[in-house]
Image (cartoon, helix red, strand yellow):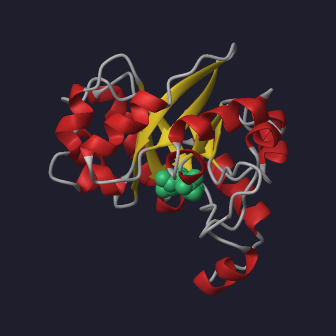
Amino acid sequence: MRNIFIACDTSDPKKVNKIIKNSQFKIKGYRVGYKFGLEFFYSIKGRQFISKLKNKVIFLDLKLSDIGNTCAAAIKSLKDLKNINYLTVHANSGEATLKSVVRATRKYNKKIRVIAITVLTSISNANIKKIGHTKSIKDLVRKQTLLSKACGCHGIVCSGSETKFVKKIFKKEIIVPGIRLKGDSAGDQKRVSGPKEAFSNGATSIVIGRSVTKNNIRKNIKRLIKELK
Ligand code: C5P
């Protein structure tokens, strides 16, 4: 089953309710899930709201990036959230952190699938050089995917441009954000792809935010369904 995660990038629970209410749809082979990131989780009501969501596929995009001990302790602090299906950690945090996160989820919340973020979709080849990397995005994604695999992560996040080669070296979940519907602007994203393109190149899930949540959600969902067919 392919997941379509709608990014609930807001700090307002009412807006999340609106997104959920207007984005329910059924197409064979796909299921809809909801992604909550830093903005919502850090907000006063965010965590509690998430804890009460029932019968939804929930992707908690906390993008952990700290020493292993701290990340494991953070996962322990999440152990009451039994409804979380996916949790993210930066592959850049390194082997010890990735292993520690996998170990901690096994201990405190077996249901959580650990997803390693490779190179953010908002980063271009020029940006990556400024950070100090000498490799291309492609090489870095390859290295980080292999590291995540060796550490026992259940999936990775990369852009739609990398899925074709990633799927050759990684047979688990490949989640692709930076999805844009036809005619929508890329905004801050640098490596964007269409929903159909991402799935046909090997994504097992996509994450779509503004193309669905901006303006009329129902109309955008219709556009998404049309593009997927
Ligand atoms: O609005 P848009 O579709 O660009 O939102 C993309 C979502 O995916 C955001 O919530 C962002 O935090 C997340 N994301 C990303 N790139 C990654 C990992 C997550 O854009 N590599």
Q: Residue at x 26, y 35 (%)?
A: 50
Q: Is residue 135 above or below residue 217?
A: below
Horizontal side of residue 187 vs 40, given as left or right = right
Q: How many marks?
A: 0
Q: Nearer the viewer, residue 150 or 81?
A: 81
Q: Quadrant of ligand 1?
A: bottom right
Q: To which quarter of the image does residue 127 belong?
A: bottom right
Q: Is residue 95 visible?
A: no
Q: Nearer the viewer, residue 169 or 227?
A: 227
> Which residue is at a point 50% across and 58% down the rendered structure image?
94
Q: Is residue 57 above or below residue 43?
A: above
Q: Position of residue 147 (x, y in %)?
A: 62, 49
55 is higher (above) or lower (below) than 229: above
Residue 102 place in picture, x, y as percent: 42, 37
Most foreground residue, 112 or 25: 25
Residue 208 appears in the picture as rendered: yes
Tell me the quadrant of the picture where the N terminus can be found: top right
Q: Is residue 20 left or right of residue 2?
A: left
